[in-house]
Amino acid sequence: MTTAALLESLSSRLPRESLFADAESLDARSADATEDLRARPELVVRPRSEAEVVALLAAAREMKFAVTPQGALTGLSGGALAVNGGVALDLTAMNEILEIDRENLFATVQAGCVTETLQNSVEAVGLFYPPDPSSRGSCTIGGNVAENAGGPRAAKYGTTGRYVSGLRVVLPGGKVLPLGGKNRKDVAGYDLLSLFVGSEGTLGVVTRATLRLLPLPSERRLLWASFGREEQALAAVARLYAAGPEPSACEFMERKAAEVSAAQLALALPADADAHLFVEVDGHEATAIAADAERIGQMLLDAGALDVRVAMNDREIRDFWRLRRAVGEAVKRLGPYAEEDCAVPRTRLPELLRAVREVARRRGLTAVCYGHAADGNIHVNVVQPPGERERWLAERDAAVAEIFRAVVALGGTITGEHGVGLTQRAYLTLRHPPEVIAAMRAVKQIFDPEGVLNPGKIF
């Protein structure tokens, strides 16, 4: 359907100020953070209420045009791109924090609420929303729910799904499902709430979320451990978690990842280190957290760390985290790349790195690795060698497939937190047998029989 036809059809159903057909608006909604992907919608709809979402999805089923839900477009799998044209459903204007319930420890927000905005708002009243994806300063709660977003603190606190207690979801055709609420326990029927978490906007559109909160930890320590070899650092992760105490984060950066991040921030690195771990502990008692940090520091030294530095105040902790959080953008400066979101049991992280290095060596490519070691979740960036675009394009997909086959052989998965979306759908059969994929397709068919909602994703 053309832009003009869509605009005419929807003008009688939705406020004109919610419809955008100008080139600037269409271009702004044509790309996410995935390298080298663009898909232009025919129309952008930016609703300000759930009623407008209902009207749009009723029209979509009736007229059979595609609707692709979008948040801040920070995704890394192409999952929010309008690859079949139609409407880009921009939910960022529905961004209110509707309630912070301090007594019951819940927040209720609209889908377009920015994650960091929620975090800052609840921390101002002594509460804590733990999920912290790298793009938390711009990504939205609706997008986090759609991808079951993680981040460094998932090591201790878990991913977004652990905090989703209620949702309002609009289905293709316009029906609204009110799911869950503020109950801490509820087994009245099937767990449809969890079905929508991580469904990548393919089953329904989340318009509102009720989220669990925690008391805000008052104490934190961050340790930066440098290792002479990558495998020493990764082997230390499993030892750390087997011995306790449980860190709130444990992040890995290899030498090249640390170097490009440090260069961007004008920071100095240990010259003899091939790998780094960032280990954080938090809690509510200063004495206990100081003791935990001391124990962890000694364990890291016993595991072969060349040096362990400790950040004890907020400024030092922010400075340490800057290096880790900057790496995703810094790696882009190395040239075109394909970022693969590999996850394995954490005891098998050294084997994963060996497999990645072997594939890269054999194919003459560069692989830059970093990520959430505590979760066994490493982001493998296959980078184009300078001046070798044609060879890189010829080798890249085969290299990625080899890496994923190695990941699955180690008991891992093709995506830990970025989602299948568009970029990983070709590898889904490596992770799941046909009968599992058939069951997933059957679920999609139940909720979206016409295939109008985020088509072309996952399968």
Image (cartoon, rainbow, N blue to C red):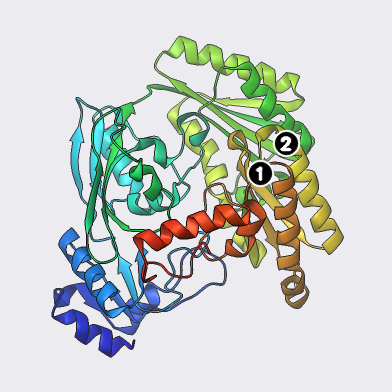
Q: Position of residue 36 (x, y in %)?
A: 57, 72
Does dot 2 land on a helix, a strand or a loop? Answer: helix
Residue placed under numbered mark 2 in the picture: 348
Q: Please, is residue 373 above or below residue 397 in the view?
A: above
* Sequence-first disc among 1 and 2: 2
Relative to residue 264, is residue 65 drawn left or right? Answer: left
Visible in this render: residue 202?
A: no
Q: Where does residue 382 sit, x and y in percent of width and height? A: 70, 60
The residue furthest right is: 362
Label placed on residue 412:
1
Find out whether the residues at labels 1 and 2 contact each other: C-beta distance under 8 Å.
yes
Q: Residue at x 63, y 38 (%)?
A: 376
Provide the secondary structure element on which disc 1 rests: loop
The part of the image, by quadrant, that contains residue 143 is bottom left
Query: Which quadrant, please, contains the N terminus?
Result: bottom left
Residue 24 relative to residue 330: left or right: left
In space, the residues marked 1 and 2 are separated at their CA atoms by 9 Å
* Mark 1 crowdedness (10 Å alpha carbons): few <14, some 14-19, many ≥20: many
Residue 198, how many percent across, how many down?
44, 50
Q: How many marks?
A: 2
Closer to the camera in the image, 298 or 265? 298
